[in-house]
Image (cartoon, rainbow, N blue to C red):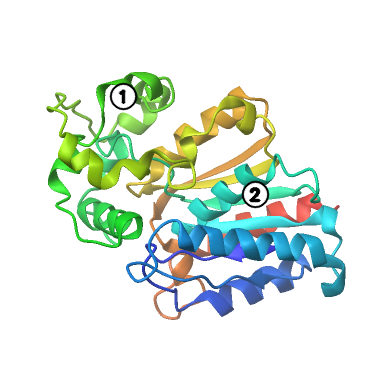
Amino acid sequence: MEVFLGGGFCFLPGASEKICRFMANQSDSVVVSVGFRLAPEHPYPVPVLDCLTATIHFLKNAEEYGVDPNCIAIVGDSSGGTFATAICQELVTREDLPRLRAQVLIYPFLQSGDFDLPSYQQNQSIPLLYRKRAIKLGLTHLTGKEINVDPVIKGAHIPPDYREKYKKWISVDNIPEEFKARGYVPSAPVPFSKELYEQVKRAGETKFAPLLAEDDIIRQLPETFLLTCEYDILRDDGLLYKKRLEDNGVLVTHHHLPDGFHATISFFDLWPLEFPSSRKCMEHVVQFLKSLYK
């Protein structure tokens, strides 16, 4: 399997070896942990293209690593989950490459069209990923610059035609009612800022916001594992993508951690800071990986 570990697009995680070693040992798999260049020095799309290049190389040369090219899964958490999602979408049209066996997406960032969904409101001040910080990191990845996030949170960067086109996919109506129980107040639309849009207009590209891929791409995706956490601003990104996948006939294994928070996997086996959700996350991932190759 290939693993892309997150770090807010701008950092490399410190726990990567421990996580990869556990997945390799417990699932009896070969694990390739992919490094990639980071923003702001290397803004979008450089990091995702680095990951794509590594994936294509691995698919073409898997047998040299003792790997069956038809049994490769891609794993990613947080921004690494964004890259994993985008790469899976990019590869569905590549008839010259083996098909990926599965994608494993752990609380990925998937859309830039609504930063006021219930999970963004409910968890905006919950560590480790505050709403303002998350959007700031995302925009730094996108542009290589610092941009005022306040109007972006309110949606001033979204053109009216974009909002209309994608409301069928990015809508609070697509989120189950149980996830609105901790409170949600719909916000009134704000005026569109063309100046702001020009700064961030690539945020609508599917390599940055994979939730926006067309149905003919989504329906070709491999079997999917998706993990969401209750105390995570990105929870609803995952829930919306789950619906899109299932609506297009993709087999989805979804685990929701009621006590989980963003980056919980980074605390796995980190004594004395490991949380119950950290181990649950890893156990769910390993169980899914083992099920692929029974």
Asked which secondary structure carries label 2, the reply is strand
Closest to the observer, 84 or 193:
193
Q: Which residue is mark 1?
A: 163
Q: Is residue 72 above or below residue 165?
A: below
Tell whether 99 sits left or right of 254: right
* Residue 16 position within the rendered picture, expressed as x and y whole percent measured from the top left: 53, 75
**Residue 283 visible in the current orientation:** no
* Residue 235 position within the rendered picture, expressed as x and y whole percent measured from the top left: 40, 43
Q: State the residue at coordinates (73%, 44%).
A: 94
Between label 1 and label 2, give the one nearer the viewer: 1
**Residue 43 in which image quadrant:** bottom left
Other residues around mark 2 within 10 Å, as few (<14) / some (14–19) / many (≥20): many
Q: Is residue 167 above or below residue 93?
A: above
Other residues around mark 1 within 10 Å, as few (<14) / some (14–19) / many (≥20): some
Q: Which mark is residue 128?
A: none
Closest to the observer, 103 or 41:
41
**Residue 266 in which image quadrant:** bottom left
Q: State the residue at coordinates (81%, 48%).
A: 96
* Residue 180 position within the rendered picture, expressed as x and y whole percent measured from the top left: 31, 30
* Residue 22 position within the rendered picture, expressed as x and y whole percent measured from the top left: 64, 73
Tell whether 31 sits left or right of 208: right
Q: Which mark is residue 103?
A: 2
Asked which secondary structure carries label 1, the reply is helix
Q: State the residue at coordinates (67%, 38%).
A: 221
**Residue 201 in which image quadrant:** top left
Q: What's the amino acid at mark 2?
A: Gln
Q: State the residue at coordinates (39%, 75%).
A: 273
Q: What's the amino acid at mark 1?
A: Arg
